[in-house]
Image (cartoon, rainbow, N blue to C red):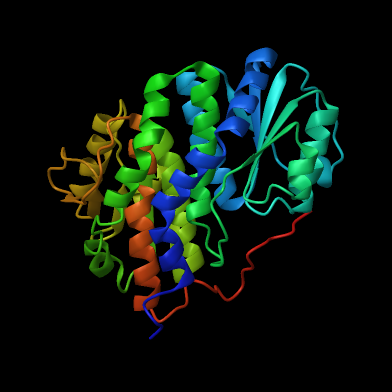
Amino acid sequence: MLDTTTHMHNEVAEIPQAIQRFLALSGDMAGQAAEALKARNPALITTIARGSSDHACAFLKYAIELYAGVPVASLGPSIASIYGAKLRLQSAATILVSQSGRSPDIIAMAEAARDGGALALALTNNPTSPLAASADHAIDIAAGPELSVAATKTFVSSIVAGLAVLGKWQGDHALLQALADLPGHAEKALSCDWSPLSEALDAKNSFYVLGRGPSWAIAQEVALKFKETCSLHAEAYSAAEVMHGPVELVASDFPVLALCARDAAEQSSVAAAEKIADTGAQVFLTSRLARNSTKLPFVATGHPLTDALCLVIPYYVFVEAYSRHLGLNPDKPARLNKVTRTR
């Protein structure tokens, strides 16, 4: 059995401080990026990232579409690095997210986006990286060193950085206040006990994670972390899309985690989860509206976006401990590296 203090454990515990550090140190950079967005007034925003960073982009996609009314589309990095395609992005802005800022395909896409006329904004934990140098505006997410292969605090800080830009761009005082309050809420989220999941997952080789809107982006990150740290299969679905086929695989005792924030999608997400629970599946739900599902504790932050973001924190606490429960080292997955240099 590993020592209970892993890098991942320590980095998850540091999430509240990492958020506070960004808010204290990077406000000017976020403000400058917001002013550039106001000047550009983009008709389209594109995102470029891979892995956990792409899940952060999925979260920001929903946030931007909901709170700025601008459509957001993900661009495949291979469009530039492999296919060499030219894109027309004169009326667009591009958000690039990379913790290391050193992946060749992301850098190539940053350069292609700028060559196509886009305003390029980079969110990175390495402000001296090649990606930062390739962008019009580079925002240091200020998460501090992350030694575990599994990204945790950098995922949260990337989203916080993007939300800070959004809030300043839109003059959204409620969102900016929610970010100011977030370190305290994140601290409370660390104490939410999701250990009831453990027994449901033991002896299983797969589970589903559901969400809608920003919570679906969190579901994608949850599924990835289960694969990375526990070497077990997990699949993320929209709480609507799961009913269009994947629910057929849900047999009795099949474990399902439904992530619900306090937002407009909560009732429909709960209804889908409860319908699955009625089939005999073991469904865990982050909502007080749960009827036949097992309720998991959560932190209600008072804002739909930070409420959804805080759902990932108790999961990170859980999955780090569950990985050790399986006799694995969550810091060092057997076939993964901290920096993945794809082309």
Residue 318 or residue 157, whichever sits in front: 157
Residue 288 vertical position relative to residue 34 in the rendered view, above or below: below
x and y percentages locating residue 258 in the rendered image: 30, 46
Q: Is residue 17 above or below residue 8?
A: above
- Where residue 66 sits, quadrant-wise, is top left
Whether residue 249 is visible, yes or no, is: no
Quarter of the rendering occupied by the N terminus: bottom left
Is residue 263 in sight in this rendering?
Answer: yes
Vertical position of residue 323 compared to residue 86: above or below: below
Front in this rendered view, residue 136 or 26: 26
Number of dots carrying numbers? 0
Q: Is residue 175 above or below residue 287?
A: above
Residue 197 image offset from top left, x and y in percent: 26, 62
Which residue occupies 38% across, 64% down? 319
Residue reaching furthest to the bottom: 1
Name of the residue lying farthest toward the front? 24
Q: Residue 52 versus residue 3: which sits nearer the camera?
A: 3
Left or right of 336, for residue 115: right
What residue is rendered at 36% in x and 77% in y? 4
Q: Position of residue 63 (x, y in %)?
A: 47, 28
Q: Position of residue 168 (x, y in %)?
A: 52, 22
The answer to whether residue 66 is left or right of residue 141 is left
The extreme left residue here reads 291
Relative horizontal placement of residue 17, taking residue 92 as reference (left or right): left
